[in-house]
Structures are given as C-alpha cells and as structure tokens.
Image (tube, grey):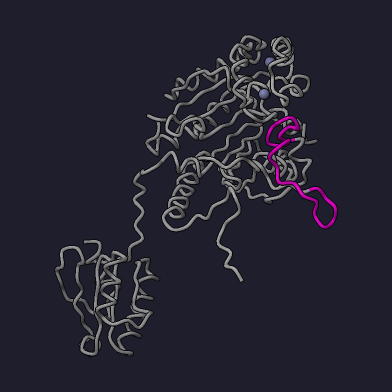
Amino acid sequence: MNLITKVPKGTKDIIGAESDKTVWLEALLRDTVRPFGYGEVRTPVFEHTELFERGVGDTTDVVTKEMYTFEDKGGRSITLRPEGTAGAVRAFLESGAYAGTLPVRMYYFANCYRYEKPQAGRWREFEQFGVEMFGSKEPYADAEVISIPYRIFEKLGLLESITLNINSIGCPECRQHYQKALYEYFSSHKDKLCETCLTRLDKNPMRIIDCKSPVCSEIAKGAPIMLDYLCDECREHFEKVKKLLTEMGISFEVDPTIVRGLDYYTKTVFEFVSNGIGAQGTVCGGGRYDGLCTQLGGVDMPALGFGMGIGRLLMVLGDYDFGIDNAPAVYIGSIGDEAKAKAMVICDALRASGVSAQCDIMARSVKAQMKYADKVGAKYSVILGEQECADNRAKIKNMSDKTEREISLSNFVNEFKEIYNG
Ligand SMILES: [Zn+2]
Ligand SMILES: [Zn+2]
C-alpha cells in the first residue's frame, strides 16, 4: 500500500515551532480579552446550513461559492462553519444569555472552512479568533471593541505596520437610500460588470464594491459613498465613535470603501490592515451587526465584534522574537540500571515542581547521551554512575560556561532550583 503523505489542498499541519508560536499567540489573545470581561464560547464545527445562509447572507461569496456543505446521514443540510460569528450568535440566543445581565462578552477560537483558491495567507481550513459583545447600541461599545485588536497589535509591536481603518455603513433606513444610489450608478455600467455582479445589482449592489474582478473594482472606485447618505442618528453615532477613539489614543483612518464581505453589518465597520503582506493585508475585521439576532429569529439585540485569522497574524509577525524556549533546564545522564532508575526518579520530582528535565530513555552510551543533551540545548547536565549513587552526590555542569559544582542527589530539586535561579 502507498503511504498517504499529502494533506488535502489548502490545509496544513501545524507542528513544532509553528505550533509553539500558535499556542503562545492564543495565550496572549486570551490574556488580552480577559481583563475586558470576556468569557470563552466553544460552538460546534458544523451547523445547520440555514444558519450561515441567514446569518452571513445568501448573496455573499462566502455563502454562494465557498461553503463546505453536505447532507448528513439523517438528510439534514450541514455546513462546516466558514466564520465564527454566526455560531457564537446562535449560541448566545440558544443559551438565553440575553435575558441575563448585559452586556454579554464572548470570545472564541474557531477552526473555519472555506473552499477558496489557496494562496498566501489563505487556507481552506484556518483558525479564527474573535469576540462578540451583545446588548449595547451605544458608541462606547464600538470604541471598546475596536480598542481590543488595537491593544493586541500594540502588545505585539505591530502598530507601525498595521493601520486601523473605520467606516460607517449606516442602518437599514439610510442604507436604503444608498443602495438606490448605488443601483443607479452601477446600472449605468451594466455592460461592463461581471456576471456575479449583475445578479448582485438587483439583490445587493453593495456587494459589487467587494468584487475582486479588476474591471468591477475599477468601476466601484467612482461609486457613491455611504458616508454621504448617513441619517442623523448614524452620523452622530459615527462621530462619537471617532471622538472616543481619539480620546483613547487610538489612531485610525476613515476609509469609505470598507463595506465588509458579510451582510450582517450595520453602522460601524473596521479593518486592521497590514502593509506587510500585500493584497491580502486585512488581519482583523469587524463591526456592529444590530440586525443579526433578529435575522436569526431571535430577540432584538444590538451586537458587535471582530474576527482575526491566527495564521495570517503569524505571517504578519514574521520573524518576531516569541522568546519560546523548549530546552530542558537539566539533562540527567546515567550509566547502569541503578543510576538510570535514580535519574528517572529525580527527573520525575523536578518536573513535578515545574522544572523541565530529561534523562536517557534510549539506553544510549554516555557519549551519545551528552551529544543529545547538547543538541536539545540543555542548560545543565549531570552524569550519574555507580560512584555518584553510592556517594549521593554528583557534579552538575553549566553547559554554556562549562563550570561544574557539586549537587546532592537526595536534595536535588531544591539545590538545582538555587543554582538555576542564581
Ligand atoms: Zn441610519
Ligand atoms: Zn464583479
């Protein structure tokens, strides 16, 4: 039989150093959102297809072209989640959390699936981190949510290369006027629009602004902008968000071309764009989606959030110094059965007290053991033989400056910690 050695197209294994970085980054993200009062929500990888059709929007590229949808053995239409928000909102509604204390703050890590053309920074399976906040229609909530990714990028030293762009896409009332203006504008270019955009023209002309076809995006450059159509309430909301961000020391630019690829957004939308990874530069996107809960058949509940791709963020971080050190603090070599057992017992005690320690489990020669200790970057090493076991003492060597000193085997953990912590 042939050995199966290829992952499916557009997917990848995360192993070794990349896995270490991922875990490190996840911890940083958790540590950042906890002080804001966020709690984790874990939802299923698959949901009823209808959730995404209604929650993401049935005119979006994600829903029309990119979903992994299949019929399960019970005849239900099931879809692997293409993004994290719809599931989190469903869970919020299903749990009844809306009847409790507001606001409700949730964060998630979700593996998501999209059938896309694989390219730099885009995979068919990718991990998304996001937060959702429910219950506030006030601009304070917008400013707080936007401040989260800002503080994350600040911690990572990325603010020099990442820009925050914000826009308002209004409410259903003022957007109606805008959609009409867009319809008129794009209708006059009907003969040049791509086939997908022709269907969008009647259903949702705002989607045309998102089109990746060069011809359509060239036409979109001359399209009317939403900011000119905002109603008084939406305009005031947007002004307040900008004022709050300024007061919090968060720099931003207003970008009227942001409409976000998903249908559920209202009022504030934002993107953090890196100038490091070219055309695929959006590392975080989000906004307000006051109509989503009712669109899913739930209570009327204002909400907002953002999502960011972990893989893409790692790409942006590039050769960032994560300071991850997996090297054992000490390697305990051994000669003979008695010493091998002793080495295992000491290692066991060291690890129980939080010290990373390794000993020989390959029955190697002492020379090979020391070569291994060197290779894995052990900070200290000890070799136990018959004599050391009998004396209950051994010499411990600092692997970088090669200095040696004595250590007691019966009090190894305490003495080692003293040496190690200086
Ligand atoms: Zn409005
Ligand atoms: Zn198009």
Q: Quadrant of ligand 2?
A: top right
Say if the magenta span includes residue 69.
Answer: yes
Front in this rendered view, residue 190 or 176: 190
Q: Residue at x 73, y 35 (%)?
A: 64
Residue 308 % position (x, y): 54, 38
Callout count:
0
Front in this rendered view, residue 299 or 166: 166
Can residue 383 be seen at all in this image of the molecule? yes
Answer above or below: position of 320 versus 216: below
Can residue 40 be seen at all in this image of the molecule? no
Residue 122 % position (x, y): 55, 41
Answer above or below: position of 85 versus 208: below
Residue 121 % position (x, y): 51, 40
Say if the magenta span includes residue 1.
Answer: no
Front in this rendered view, residue 196 or 73: 196
On screen, residue 269 versus residue 149, left or right, reads right
Q: Residue at x 61, y 27 (%)?
A: 212
Q: Residue at x 74, y 34 (%)?
A: 293
Answer above or below: position of 273 versus 325: above
Quadrant containing the C terminus is bottom left
On screen, residue 13 versus residue 318, left or right, reads right
The part of the image, by quadrant, that contains residue 370 is bottom left
Q: Which residues are magenta?
A: 55-77
The part of the image, by quadrant, that contains residue 381 is bottom left
On screen, residue 369 versus residue 261, left or right, reads left
Q: Residue at x 28, y 82 (%)?
A: 365
Quadrant containing the N terminus is bottom right
In this view, the residue farthest toward the right is 75
Residue 91 % position (x, y): 71, 45
The part of the image, by quadrant, that contains residue 117 is top right
